[in-house]
C-alpha cells in the first residue's frame, strides 16, 4: 500500500493487482527465486525487442484506456510500436517550465519524495538506509552532498517518460554504473535497496542558480535502456536530457547543503511517507537564500 498527494493537499491510497503481485514476490523466499531471472539485463533486452516490434502496437489502445491517459497532452501522430508510443512527446504547451531563477523545478512527471542527507552521507527511504557513496560508487563525490537533499522522482508506467535539465549550466559526461533491474515499485524498496543495486547513469551539472547538481537516471524491471543526450556541453533549463524505454523508472536529483530547500508541502508529505504527484517543469523547491 502507498499514499500519494497532489499539490492541493488531497491524499489518496494507490494500490493495484500489480502491487499485490510484486509484494508477494519480494516478501517471500519462493517469490524472490522466481524474480531472479527477471532482473537480468538479458531479459530486459528481450523485452525491448518485443516492445520495439510493430506487432506490439496492438497494446496501445488497451494501455491508454486502462491508465486513463489524457492523449490530448501529446502530439497527434501514428505510433509504429508500443515503445514508440511509450516514448511519445508532449504537445506544444502541455507543460510549462518555470523560469524564475530562484525556482527549483521537477525534471519529469512523477511521484516525488525528498530525503535529507545527514553529515555521514546517509539517508533513509522507508525502511531502507542508503549511503550516498553506495549510490554513486564514489566516496569523494558523496562527501560533496553531505547535508543536502536527495530528490526521488518515481515514474509510473502511465507517466510521461522524457525528462529535462533542471537548470542552465555546464553538464559533465555521463557516468554509468552497471546493475540488475528491480522494479522501482515501493513494494520492492521495502525489501531490498533497489536504487543502489539497479543499473543507473548520472552526470553533474554546474548550474547557474543552485551550485553543483547531480542528476541520475535509474533503470527498472524491463527498462534496459536509459537514453540520454550527449554530455559535456552547455544546457538550458527545460531542455530535454533523455528518456526511458518501457516500464516504471526513477530520476534522482541531489542538491548540496545550503543551495535548495524543498517546498513545505513536499517536505511534510515526505516525512509522513507520502509521495507527491508533480509535473515536469513545475516548482518543487526554492533557492535557499530566498528565505
Image (spheres, grey):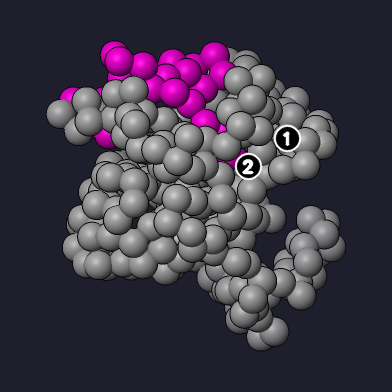
Across and down, in percent, residue 102 comes to 45, 50
Range drawn in magenta: 112-139
In the rendered structure, the answer to whether residue 61 lies left or right of residue 271 reads right
- Magenta residue check for 129: yes
For the residue pair 243 and 284, the one nearer the viewer reads as 284
Quarter-wise, where is residue 95 in the image?
bottom right
Secondary structure of the residue carrying numbered label 2? strand
The residues tagged by marks 1 and 2 sit, at their Cα atoms, a distance apart of 7 Å
Residue at left offset 61%, top offset 61%: 160
> x, y (%) of residue 267?
58, 28
The tag earlier along the polypeptide, 1 or 2, is 1
Where is residue 251 shown, x and y percent of the image? Answer: 46, 46
Residue 30 seen in this snapshot: no
Disc 1 + disc 2, Cβ < 8 Å? yes
Outermost residue toward the bottom in this view: 77
Which residue is labeled 1 in the image? 4
Q: Left or right of 95: which side holds 225? A: left
Query: Callout 2: few (<14), some (14-19), or many (20+) C-alpha neighbours within 10 Å?
Result: many
When the figure is inspected, residue 279 is found, relative to residue 153, above or below; the finding is: below
On the image, the x and y values in percent for residue 142 come to 24, 28
Secondary structure under the numbered disc 1 in the rendered image:
strand
Q: Quadrant of residue 241?
A: bottom left
Q: According to the image, label 2 marks what residue?
A: 111
Amino acid at each position: 500500500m502507498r499514499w500519494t498527494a497532489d499539490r492541493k493537499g488531497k491524499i489518496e491510497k494507490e494500490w493495484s493487482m500489480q502491487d499485490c503481485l510484486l509484494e508477494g514476490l519480494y516478501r517471500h523466499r519462493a517469490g524472490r527465486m522466481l524474480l531472479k531471472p527477471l532482473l537480468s539485463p538479458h531479459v530486459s533486452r528481450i523485452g525491448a525487442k518485443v516492445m520495439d516490434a510493430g506487432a506490439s502496437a496492438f497494446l496501445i489502445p488497451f494501455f491508454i484506456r486502462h491508465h486513463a491517459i489524457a492523449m490530448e497532452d501529446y502530439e497527434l501522430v501514428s505510433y509504429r510500436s508500443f515503445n514508440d508510443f511509450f516514448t511519445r512527446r508532449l504537445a506544444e504547451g502541455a507543460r510549462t517550465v518555470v523560469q524564475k531563477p530562484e525556482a527549483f523545478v521537477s525534471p519529469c512527471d512523477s511521484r516525488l519524495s525528498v530525503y535529507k542527507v545527514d553529515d555521514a552521507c546517509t539517508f533513509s527511504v522507508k525502511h531502507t538506509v542508503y549511503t550516498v557513496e553506495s549510490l554513486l560508487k564514489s566516496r569523494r563525490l558523496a562527501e560533496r552532498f553531505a547535508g543536502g537533499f536527495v530528490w526521488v522522482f518515481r515514474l509510473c508506467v502511465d507517466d510521461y517518460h522524457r525528462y529535462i535539465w533542471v537548470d542552465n549550466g555546464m553538464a559533465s559526461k555521463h557516468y554509468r554504473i552497471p546493475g540488475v533491474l528491480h522494479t522501482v515499485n515501493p513494494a520492492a524498496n521495502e525489501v531490498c535497496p533497489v536504487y543502489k543495486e539497479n543499473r543507473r547513469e548520472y552526470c553533474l551539472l554546474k548550474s547557474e542558480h543552485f551550485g553543483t547538481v547531480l542528476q541520475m537516471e535509474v533503470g527498472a524491471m524491463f527498462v534496459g535502456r536509459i537514453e540520454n543526450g550527449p554530455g559535456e556541453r552547455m544546457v538550458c533549463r527545460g531542455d530535454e536530457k533523455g528518456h526511458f524505454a518501457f516500464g516504471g523508472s526513477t530520476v534522482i536529483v541531489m542538491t548540496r547543503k545550503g543551495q535548495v530547500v524543498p517546498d513545505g508541502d513536499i517536505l511534510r508529505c515526505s516525512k509522513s511517507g507520502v509521495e507527491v504527484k508533480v509535473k515536469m517543469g513545475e516548482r518543487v523547491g526554492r533557492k535557499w537564500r530566498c528565505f
